Image (tube, grey):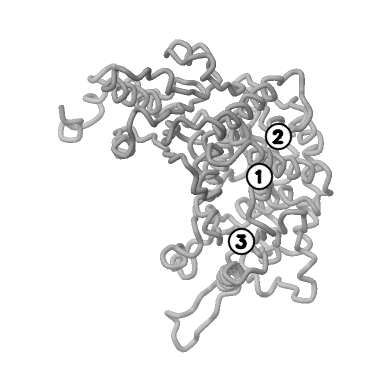
Amino acid sequence: MSEIRKQIKNKISLLGKGIKNTHISELQNHKDLEKRVIKANLLDFDYSKQRINDEAIDYLLEIPNLINLKDSIDRLFRGDLYNPTEDRAVSHTLYRDKTSNERFELIFTERERIKSFLKQNATSLNFKNLICLSIGGSRLAPELLNEFQALDGPVNIYFCSSYDLLELRDVLRNCNQNETVIFASSKSFETSEILKNLDFVKSWYEEKPDIDFYEKLYAISANVSAMSAYGIKKSNQFQVLDSLSGRFSIWSSISLPAFINSNFDSYLELLEGARLADEHTKEASWESNIPVMMALLGVWNTSSLNINNHGIFTYNFRLRSLTKYISQLSMESNGKSINFESKESHFLTSPLIWGGYGIESQHSTFQWLMQGKTETSCDFIGLNNGKKEIVDSYEMLLSQVLAMTYGKEDKDNLFKTIKGNNPCSILQLNSIDLRSLGFLLAIYEHKVFIEASILGIDPFDQWGVQLGKRIALESKNNKEFLKENFSKSILPKS
């Protein structure tokens, strides 16, 4: 398979040489724009503004068969895929399945516990504040969902993870112990940032000795023994599978805090959207398959056009933090170089994923995009449902795509010239609801997985994250370690 991937890389590099310096406006076929739009039930994907021609697309569409992608996708959805470097299964797609899998029965028992908790909370609310101590995917997932729903509910929901505890201190000023519950979310329940915040909030509860801290404390983790060792009651423990990576955990009880002000049906709507994306990915032909096409274009832009960064810009305020979520999903999964054969991948792997809320970005980073010397590929995500305010925002999205791809030459005032030629795709949502969000997020998950399948890397491990953690632990336990490596003026002041 390594030789096949090498041949793929050489072929797309060769095809890219003939296109790299060609302008998108020259490649555009205005008579056949619909040819490069893939329509699904909940969103449409338009890749007509990519810097690519029909010959290259035809070859890209051969790649899935060359790497046996159908088999990999089938194994992913059966729960048969394996993460070899961490000796774990891969289970995130099973979390939105409707039918129980006896090897992953915990998913369905925990789903019932989520249902029970949300139903009980709806009928006998006994707290006004929920503080979620979480970091990485365990924070980004529920925080995105909470922001997306924009509910004015009875519970104030806060997210804290800062190691200096300033975030938590600020939150606690708005809370009292009687009306506050804590959710500590950590897959390993060994994450130093979470444990430090948890110890601090425990000391805050101890200021009120008549209140039982452990009645107020809930935890979400794969490490049951560590939760119990901390003193967390069994009834207050929510368990996730060890095979569920944090950046894929939005489908699990990790997202429970985000539904405190809504209900279990809302949670199921999110899962249903993802399940529909799973069906699309399994059943659609390669040329009509949104995540397959997104992945192929991603590999094309990095390894053929040598574009090393990818901007994601959202044009609906409720999606303003989506880029942070996708950034972690993409770069923590595919930001690595060594392939399954312990050799360097033939391809350039994940580009830098960045971006944000498009309306704000237009007044800052778009200057660099429009007239800088670094090329960028982009995804523009917007809602198109016919309502006036929404239409205004969506028209702004389309205008920026044209500026970024076609550009505009000004021979009299060169400083006004916009080169354009940044490859862009559009993901057009038909509605802004949890089902559509679930579909969108799962599409990006599958895009990341398919990219990894082409690149020949494991998207489910994260060894690059571990070194900094280990050094931090070593320096904490051995102060001489820092003294040996930094000047005295740089060392922490005691």
**Quadrant of the image containing the C terminus:** top left
According to the image, label 2 marks what residue?
96
Residue 431, image x, y percentages? 67, 57
The residue at the far bottom in this view is: 412
Tell me which label, 1 or 2, sits earlier in the chain: 2
Query: What is the distance, in whole Å, between disc 3 and disc 1 at their CAs?
Result: 15 Å
Judge left or right: residue 57 versus residue 177: right
Q: Quadrant of residue 402?
A: bottom right
According to the image, label 3 marks what residue?
382
CA neighbours of label 3 inside 10 A, class few (<14), some (14 to 19), many (20+) = many
Residue 198, image x, y percentages? 37, 24
**In this view, 11 is above or below 87:** below
Residue at 39 percent of width and 29 percent of height: 468
Is residue 352 among what the camera can see? no
CA neighbours of label 1 inside 10 A, class few (<14), some (14 to 19), many (20+) = many
Is residue 111 or residue 176 the one in the foreground? 176
Local SS, label 2 = helix
According to the image, label 1 marks what residue?
438
Judge left or right: residue 65 versus residue 255: right
Q: Quadrant of residue 414?
A: bottom left
